[in-house]
Amino acid sequence: MTKKVAVVAIGGNSLIKDPKHQTVEDQYQAAKETTYHIADLIEAGWDVAIGHGNGPQVGFTLRRSEIAAKVEGLHEVPLEVCGADTQGAIGYALQQNLQNELRRRGIKKSVATVVTQVAVDPNDKAFQEPSKPIGSFMDEAEAKRRQQEMGWIVQEDAGRGWRRVVASPLPQEVVELEVVQTLLNAGMVVITVGGGGIPVIRKPDGDLQGIAAVIDKDYASSLLARLIKADLFLISTAVEKVALNYGKPNQKWLDRLTLAEAKQYLAEGTHFAKGSMAPKIQAIIWYLEAGGKQAIITNPENIGRALKGETGTWIVP
Ligand code: ADP
Ligand code: MG
């Protein structure tokens, strides 16, 4: 049997189910549920690379760092290091849960988390208009001081105070690609490009350097799926299917979309919300345009049924 490789991008609901369940223990339980469904995929014979989000977790780490600095004068944690910290912590939760589930099922397979850097283009136009708010609210004086002393870009946020904003450039290169590919070739499960990857740039002399930015996790997972020529790109999120006219009276759930239809509906601009569903559809479009074979959007509990063609939204060339 030729091995088939799936890239599974898991969304925020795989770690935080609702605002009342955000503790580390809660996140571990949520990860457990999702990894159970990923184990189904593995049991069905797929080799799997898992990408995941980290937005709220980076937010918690940053705020902890800011509060500790304010109260005790402890050093702060730079944004890209928050990315590395959360890749490790989230990777740990996913990896241990998946190891436990695979062992229960008698499946002999190793699971590894790779701290993964993703290179972006320093000339990406996103850097001209940073738009992603990061960290705690500040008063104007502190915002201006941070701008002066640390080169932060700060913005007033609709009367609620000041916040730091960073760019969200497109992912260009998965730095640890060879590591990920080697682990997959050896039949191991890999957790990688967490939170879209730690954003880095390649300096003119070739050295890598961390940079304060955030990368969309669906875009980074799409890049990975293209680079490893994945046979399936599965995006697990909070909805069972994708809808046209989402949230409107004429909403229509979709079972199947072609690449051409996906491009058309995305271009219409009214169906897929910016910052949530639109980037997922775009991520899948890029994957299919690069020769990808099939993509599915569904929620964790329906991964198994979706694979059998019973639910989810399938997007095909
Ligand atoms: P994730 O953490 O998985 O990336 P997001 O909140 O970013 O989750 O995106 C998934 C959400 O997108 C869904 O829970 C749903 O509320 C929203 N959404 C926006 N447009 C659509 C659509 N057309 N069809 C289905 N869901 C949509
Ligand atoms: Mg999202």
Image (cartoon, rainbow, N blue to C red):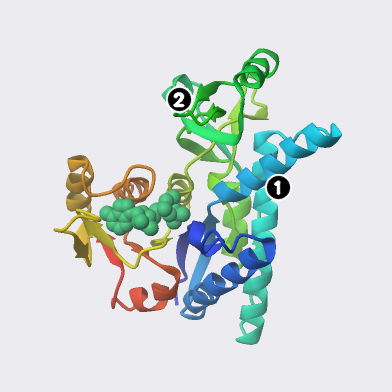
Instruction: Assign the N terminus to one quadrant of the image.
Output: bottom left
Labels 2 and 1: the sequence-earlier one: 1
- Amino acid at circle 1: Asp
Inter-mark Cα distance, 2 to 1? 25 Å
Eye-nearest disc, 2 or 1: 1
On the image, numbered disc 2 is attached to which residue? 124
309 to 299, vertically: above or below = below
- Amino acid at circle 2: Asp
Farthest residue in the front direction? 159
Seen from the viewer's position, the closer of residues 67 and 176 is 67
Label 2 CB sits under 8 Å from any ligand 2 atom? no
How packed is label 1: few (under 14 Cα within 10 Å), some, or many (20 or more)?
A: some
Seen from the viewer's position, the closer of residues 244 and 222 is 244
Residue 277 appears left or right of 40 = left
How packed is label 2: few (under 14 Cα within 10 Å), some, or many (20 or more)?
A: few
Farthest residue in the left direction? 250
